[in-house]
Amino acid sequence: MASTASQEAGIGQDLRSEQELEAGVLGKDPEQSRGEVSEDSVWVEKGDVLDFYHGKAFTQRKQVFKRRLEVNIRDLFRYIYEDGVNIYTEFHKSVMGDWDVKITNWDNVGGHRERTGSFKKKLNYTIGPKQTRVDEKSFLAFTSTGFRLEWEIHNRDVPMGSSFRVENYFDFHDAGKGYTICMGYTAVNFLTFNLLKGKIESGALKDTPAAYAKLVDFLTDGMERYFAEKNLSKLSVA
């Protein structure tokens, strides 16, 4: 399976540096930004834009995850986009133990994709609420070297939850020859003054890497099954 063959590369280390990847040295145009994608980019549609990001704290994001995946980046994008609702709903329920999960379909808006979702999850506080409602906005857009999957998360029932949003980012970079490099980032956007700012930020940085690893494993395993089933369906029709 792709997930077991994937290699943990560690934060800040890989075959190519993060700076090289972000500069677009993997065969794409590094000058191309926030405009229409060139016609030779065969896996995008007319009107798609590059380097879209929604998060207000994007420039303050910190890298917390990196992995080299043995998957084709175009297939991975197709899987996330074509079967996105089922994937993420099942991930929340079967892997994260969340409930009352509601995820919308992707909507193409201004050259990127977006959707909304909500669910309930357990909290491990010794004092305070034992669960929280979570509202989530998701965004999917192309970059000069692949694509970005982004979440803005509002934990409604945590202490001072209305004063901040957690922003999570997955950047998937085309590493060639059927390989994809996944970089995960997190940031916290504080909407108002918050006495717990330090604890909230450290908590997000601590908790996110494990969840990222679970999601990447879930995506790569599911992608293999998804395309295997599609290929079997084609063979049975033939």
Image (cartoon, rainbow, N blue to C red):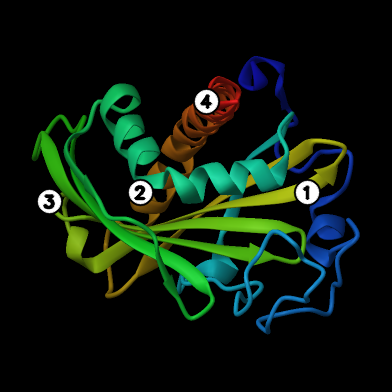
Camera-side residue: 56 or 179? 179
Give the residue at mark 4. Answer: 233
Badges 4 and 3: C-beta atoms under 8 Å apart? Answer: no
- Per the image, the residue denoted by label 3 is 157
- Gap in angstroms between the C-alphas marked 4 and 3: 45 Å
Q: Give residue 99's quadrant in the image.
A: top left
Label 1, secondary structure: give it.
Answer: strand
Q: Amino acid at mark 3?
A: Asp
Give the crowd class for mark 3: few <14, some 14-19, many >=20 residues within 10 Å: some
Gap between marks 3 and 1, in whole Å? Answer: 38 Å
Q: Secondary structure at mark 2?
A: helix
Q: Which residue occupies the extreme front position in the image?
A: 238
Identify which amino acid the numbered label 2 is placed on: Lys
Would you say the residues marked 2 and 3 are in contact, meaning their CB atoms lie under 8 Å apart?
Answer: no
Query: In the image, which is nearer the foreground, mark 1 or mark 2?
Result: 1
Which residue is identified by label 2? 199
* Nearest to N terminus: mark 3 or mark 1: 3
Q: Residue at x 75, y 62 (%)?
A: 42
Q: Nearer the viewer, mark 3 or mark 1?
A: 1
Per the model, the C-alpha gap separating discs 1 and 4 is: 28 Å
In the rendered structure, which disc, 1 or 2, sits on the residue that comes first in sequence? 1
* The N terminus - image quarter: top right
Q: Which residue is mark 1?
A: 174
Q: What residue is rendered at 39% in x and 67% in y?
A: 189
